[in-house]
Amino acid sequence: MAVPWKVLQSVTTGDGVLELRQRGERDFLITVNGLVLMNSSLHRSEVALGEVACGHLKNEAAPRVLVGGLGMAITLRAVLDQLPEKASVLVAELNPVVLQWCRGPLAPLTAGAADDPRVEVEIANVADVIRRSAMGKSRFDAIVLDLYTGPHARTDKVMDPLYGEIAIEMSKGALKPGGVFAVWGENYDQGFDKRLRQAGFSVTCDRPGRGGLRHVVYLARLASRPESRPEGRPKRQSRR
C-alpha cells in the first residue's frame, strides 16, 4: 500500500497555494495549486545543469555565479560542488518560505547547500538581479536559471522577462567575457535556441540521461574576448 503524502506547510502566494509535502524520510514534493514543481526523486537534469554551467570554473580563483530559483537547492548543490573555496554564489528566490524549507526539512538532501558560506540568498526576481548587474559593473562568470517550465513555444520572443530577446541581451551584459548562461527547460524550444545564437552565444543543448522524463539543459557561452580585426586591415570608414 502506497504511503500517503503529508503536507508539511502550505502558503498562499501570488501564483497560488505553495506546498511542501513529504513521504518517508527523503521523498519530498514542492507543489503549486496541486501541480508538482520539484520532486526530490527526479533531479537528473537539475544536477546536470549545475555541472555543465560551472564545471569549467573549478580552477578559477574566485568565480562569481548567479542562480535563479532555489527550489530544493539541488541545482545549487551541483553548482557548489564544481566551485573552489573562494567562489561566491548569489541565489535569487522569489519566495522566502522556500529558503526556510531549504534550511529546514530539505537541508539533508543537499548537505545544507543553502547555508554554505559561499552562498548569499536574495529574495528577489532574478530578472531584476540580472538587469542590475548588466547596468552596473558587477559581472558573473555564470548565470544559471532553474525556473518552473523554462522557455517554451508560447514565450514572447521579444518581451519575456527571462527568455525574450531583450532579457537575453541583459543576461549577456551581466556576464564576463567567456561567461556561461545555462538554462533549464521542460521541453526543447527552438525559438529560444535561435535567440541565444542571434545574441552572439555559442549554444549546445542536452537532454541528460536515458529514457524516462528528459528535460533540457541549454548551455550558452560568450566568446572570451571581442573578435579582433586581422592585423594590418584598416578600420572600415563609415560613409556620411
Image (spheres, rainbow, N blue to C red):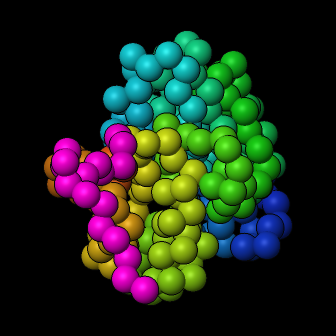
Q: Quadrant of residue 26?
A: top right
Going by the image, does 14 lie left or right of 162?
A: right
Going by the image, does 3 lie left or right of 31?
A: left
Residue displayed at 43% across by 86% down: 240
Q: Is residue 153 above or below residue 10?
A: below
The region drawn magenta spans 224-240
Question: Which residue is more in the foreground, 68 or 44?
Answer: 68
Q: Is residue 180 above or below residue 117?
A: below
Q: Is residue 203 visible?
A: no
Q: Quadrant of residue 89?
A: top right
Question: Which residue is more in the foreground, 47 or 119?
Answer: 119
Q: Count of labels shown?
A: 0
Q: Quadrant of residue 198?
A: bottom left
Whole-percent x, y for residue 149 in the image: 48, 68
Residue displayed at 67% across by 44% down: 137
Q: Is residue 113 above or below residue 228?
A: above
Residue displayed at 39% across by 16% down: 59
Residue displayed at 49% across by 71% down: 163
Q: Residue furthest top?
A: 85
Question: Which residue is more in the foreground, 176 or 40?
Answer: 176
Q: Is residue 105 above or below residue 36?
A: above
Whole-percent x, y for residue 18 in the image: 72, 62
Q: Is residue 141 visible?
A: yes
